[in-house]
Every structure is written in structure tokens, then in C-alpha cells.
Image (cartoon, helix red, strand yellow):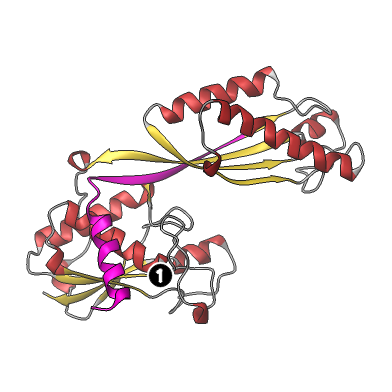
Amino acid sequence: MTTKAKMRKIIFFLILGCSQILYAQKVTRNLYFDFAKPDLNATAIKILDNLYDSITDKNTIRRIYLYGYCDSIGKSGYNDTLSIKRVNAVKKKFSDKGIKDSSFKVMKGFGKQKPLNKNATEKERQANRRVELIITFDKKKTLSQQQPTKLNIDTAEIKVGSKMILKNINFEPGMHRFLQSSEATLNELLKLMQSNPKLEIQIIGYICCLAEELGDGTDNETGLSNLSEARAIAVASYLVDNGIKKERLKYKGMGAKNKITQELTEEDKAINRRVEIVVLKK
């Protein structure tokens, strides 16, 4: 067995070894600042405290994204610095609560660039004096809580060699962690495998947003350039954790190959960022 093959086998069993499925979720908040002030006001502090408490009660914070903005009053250089100070004020609040620096994925200040409006009134300027906060977090859901949904696939139409696209299976950007919206489709696939005990499949993962010749994307959780394969393994892991024998499953990653559509919009990207199933044996 080659070194590369050994590494793939290790990654596969590491993912299969998870006793829980982790679903990535996201929350966004705007924190508004007083004129020319870099510090959090009482309202912003209360919002952050409540948000932190509500998320960490039953979840684990994965990534934090901070984007700072200012109104149009003042010079560009001053506002650029002020927006960064506002971002740092939000970061400090979370750091004081024990959030590690590694959790802060992006911290940017845009000054008075990218305004939401024309800054024509005080109300409009207030809307631009803000930090946009985005938090992704994992909601743990034990396997015993998961119930397969009603099967919508006509098993009579399934033939060896046929291909099915698993719609609505989505992942956290740059990772192999499912978004909560993926649960229904995962359960439908599980039900298909449970109802057809002789069925064997190959799970094929794809990514978006790269040229085909650039190969696979980087999985930010492992640092390996096998994101599409890791996502296919994640689907296999879900099935095995729910009682499907691993001998019935094969997997591979196709990177950015075989694009279904041009990637002009976010919807286009989501279409190409997919998981497909090929029937190997029935």
C-alpha cells in the first residue's frame, strides 16, 4: 500500500470513528458604534453577552468573522484605523470570555468603504458605524436522535450504473462538516440503504470555485488537498455510524471537475458543490 493510500485509509477511519455528527450553523449580527468611538457601547455589549451565552450553551464556536465599517465623515485614513479598532474591540470582548485567537478566521476594517447607503442622514450614518459579526458553530446531535425521513426515491427505477445527485447536502465553507440543512437528504439516503440491503454505492464528492485543472480544494480542518474526497467520506461516515456496513460503500473525490453550470452566482456554486451517488450493485 502506498503512503498516499495509507493516509487516505487513516483519514477515512478517523472520520468513521466519530460518535456524533456535527452540523455547522451560522449566526450574523450587526453591532453599532457611537460617532467617532472605537469602544463598544452598552447596547453592543449586551448583544454580545446574550449571543455568546445562547451559542455556547449547547454548541461549540468554530469560526468568527469580523468586518468593521465607518460613516463618511472624516478622512479615509482615520476611518480605516477606526474600523480596525472597532473590530479589535469586539475581538477583545470574546477573548475575555475565553475564545482562542485561532477561532478568529477573518478580521478586516473597511473604513468608509462599502457603505450600506448614501450617508445622507444621521440615521443612515449610524447604520454604517458598525461591525458585522458572523459566527459559525457546531450543534452536536447524537445519532439516537436522528430519524430517517420518508423515502422519495423510487427504488424500482434504480439500476446498476445509475447516478443520483444528493440535493441539499451542503457543507461549511472549506470543510467537510455538514450544515443542518443536509440532514433530511442524509436521512433519505440512509433509508434507501436500509430498505435495499444488497445495494452497494459509490459516493462522489465535488467542489466549486476552482478551475478543473487545479485539482482538489484544501480541507481547512486537516490541511490536506482532498476537500471533495473528505466530503464524500463524511457521507460514508454518516451511513456507517447509522449501521450501514462499510463494505457496501466506496468513495472518491473529483475536485472541481464535471461542472454542471457556470459559476456566475452563489446558486451556481452550490449546484457544482455537490455529492453524487453511483449504484454499483443492486
Q: Residue furthest left?
A: 197
For mark 1, give the secondary structure: loop
Residue 248 vertical placement versus 60 (above, below): below
The quadrant of the picture occupied by the C terminus is bottom left
Residue at 52%, 66% (x, y): give it. Answer: 268
Q: Position of residue 280 (x, y in %)?
A: 17, 77
Depth check, front residue: 78 or 129: 78
Q: Is residue 70 visible?
A: no
* Quadrant of the rendered image containing residue 69: top right
The quadrant of the picture occupied by the N terminus is bottom left
Residue at 7%, 69% (x, y): give it. Answer: 198
Q: Position of residue 126 (x, y in %)?
A: 78, 30
Residue 24 among those drawn in magenta: yes
Q: Is residue 242 left or right of residue 110?
A: left
**How many numbered discs sit on the rendered protein?**
1
Q: Position of residue 155 (x, y in %)?
A: 15, 67
Q: Which residue is mark 1?
A: 206
Magenta range is 1-29
Residue 197 among those drawn in magenta: no
Disc 1 residue crowd, few under 14, some 14–19, many 20+, Cα 10 Å: many
| Three-letter amino acid code at the position of disc 1 | Tyr
Q: Is residue 250 left or right of residue 114?
A: left
* Quadrant of the rendered image containing residue 84: top right
Depth check, front residue: 10 or 53: 10
Q: Residue furthest right?
A: 75
Q: Position of residue 261 (x, y in %)?
A: 50, 74
Q: Is residue 123 left or right of residue 94?
A: right
Residue 98 vertical placement versus 61 (above, below): above
